[in-house]
Amino acid sequence: MDLGLQDKVVFISGASGGIGRALAQCFAAEGARVALHGHRQWEKLTEWLSQQAWSDRAMTVRADVTVAREMDSALRSVEKRWGRVDVCVANAGICGPSEVPLVDIDEERVREVVDVNLLGAVWTARAFLKALVRSGPRQDGEGAVLLFTGSTAGRFGERGHADYASSKAALVGLMMTLKNEIVDIDPYARVNLVEPGWTMTEMVREHLSSPEKLTGVVQTMPLRQLARAQDIARTVVFLASPLAARHVSGQVVTVAGGMEGRVLWQTDQVDAAEVLRRLDEGG
């Protein structure tokens, strides 16, 4: 199916992580030109990009998402190369490495997580909207697209991660506001949010290292499996499509195996080895 993304310019923040790299690969597979943002892992991201067959249609950009002027500069550098930015995926995010109840949590950790996850998304979105003002809408009437990567932690909460859960929950309000503001710049532009559940990335793999933890997570899903980064990326690409999702805006699309905030399966009904086997399948 042609998703209409050929030669569209896509900016992806936080492209050095598992979901970020999957986003890059999925957009590139659709023929898009991709600008991959990194900060602390920028060198590794650039090295990874050099090994991709589609690297001639890509570039890397280094910036700190918590610094507004750096994000403005990052978007301008993409415009300098390709003239405009059609799609922006505000994907950069971090999570505290350990479970700490709010009563004991360190102020520095809270500020860092909120600064990256929420304010980083704000500055990324603002830089994109400013770029859209400079370029104006596309002449073909295919509207610009702004997408946020949220989390089911923002809906159900996450014990020991109040900082992360609250920062992701706030993205819903940001998305709902901007889907009304962006049309003042581009009348057919759209804003949506993808809400991943437990997705097996490098950051998550260590947390789910034991069968007990893995079983505990899957117990809340009717689909007894975890998401792969590609599952999230393909949903984002669908929402970015001016053909497949041209009338979808202001929506939260959850990719979490039907997750509910309650236990659906007993421990003996979840096979941790089978969950891991399905993750290793191709596709």
Image (cartoon, grey):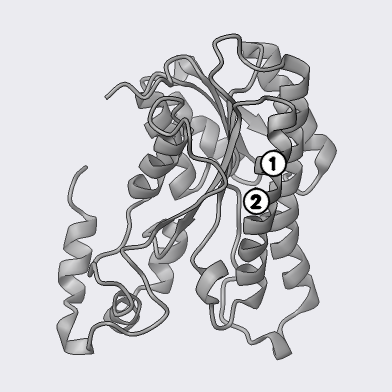
Q: Residues within 10 Å of mark 1 (few under 14, many from 20)?
A: some
> For residue 133, which quarter of the picture?
top right
> For residue 78, which quarter of the picture?
top right
Are the residues tagged 1 and 2 within 8 Å (C-beta)? yes
- Residue 235 visible to the viewer: yes
Q: Position of residue 105 (x, y in %)?
A: 71, 83
Seen at 45% across and 38% down, the residue is: 239
Q: Position of residue 76 (x, y in %)?
A: 74, 22
Side of 136 relative to 160 (left or right): right
SS at badge 1: helix
Side of 110 relative to 171 (left or right): right
List the residue tagged with mark 2.
176
Closer to the camera in the image, 180 or 221:
180
Closer to the camera in the image, 182 or 95:
182
> How many labels sit on residues?
2
Closer to the camera in the image, 272 or 181:
181
List the residue tagged with mark 1.
180
Q: Quadrant of the N terminus?
A: top left
Seen at 60% across and 48% down, the residue is: 92
Q: Label 1 sits on what residue type? A: Asn
Give the CA separation, mark 1 to mark 2: 7 Å
Q: Label 2 sits on what residue type? A: Met
